[in-house]
Amino acid sequence: IIDDTMRFIVTVVTVLAELWFSYAVDRSKFRTCDQTRFCRVYRSYMPENNAVYQVDSTSIALDDTGRLGMILKAGTELPPLKATVTALAEGGIIRLRIVDEAKPRWEASDILLATTEILQAGALAVS
């Protein structure tokens, strides 16, 4: 009888503590989707509204470091997005980076280690 009672008391205390911690969070320190530009601009353009981005074939270019750059467009109502594809030598990793140039954001100069080798485009094979 004592084991069941203790188990019940521990369960009730645990549930009450979890509820208290969930309400203890200061929600004013977190941004909502309505407070960010990206969400305001792109939320209404979901796939059901036919806002599908496509690569502008005339914009595909290769830079000196082996990164493949391109512009993504979705009609006239949305701003174009800049995409960069980088192939890393280790692990067969492909890095896709999409940037909204209409509103530049702070970015780290590069998050890759200095020793990370980038494959040149000629070394890539599509299968």
Image (cartoon, helix red, strand yellow):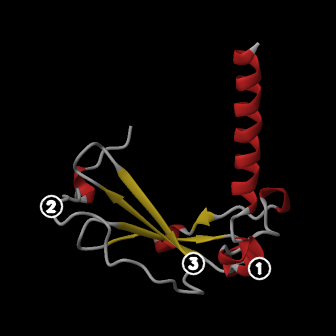
The answer to the question of whether label 3 and label 2 lie on touching residues, with beta carbons closer than 8 A, is no
**Count of numbered marks:** 3
Above or below for 112 versus 77: above
Res 13 seen here: yes
For label 2, the SS is loop
Instruction: Indicate which label's residue lies in the foreground, 3 or 2.
Output: 2
Identified at 71% across, 24% down, the residue is 7
Q: Is residue 89 left or right of residue 5?
A: left
* CA gap, disc 3 and disc 2: 28 Å
Q: Residue 56, image x and y in percent?
A: 56, 69
> N-terminal of the two: label 3 or label 1?
1
Out of 76 and 41, give the one closest to the viewer.
41
Of all residues, the one furthest to the top in this rendering is 1
Residue that sits furthest to the bottom in the current view:
103
State the quadrant of the C terminus: top left
Amino acid type at circle 3 is: Asp
| Disc on the earlier residue, 2 or 1 | 1
What number is the disc on residue 77? 1
Pair 2/1: label in front: 2
The residue that mark 2 highlights is 115
Q: Mark number for residue 100?
A: 3
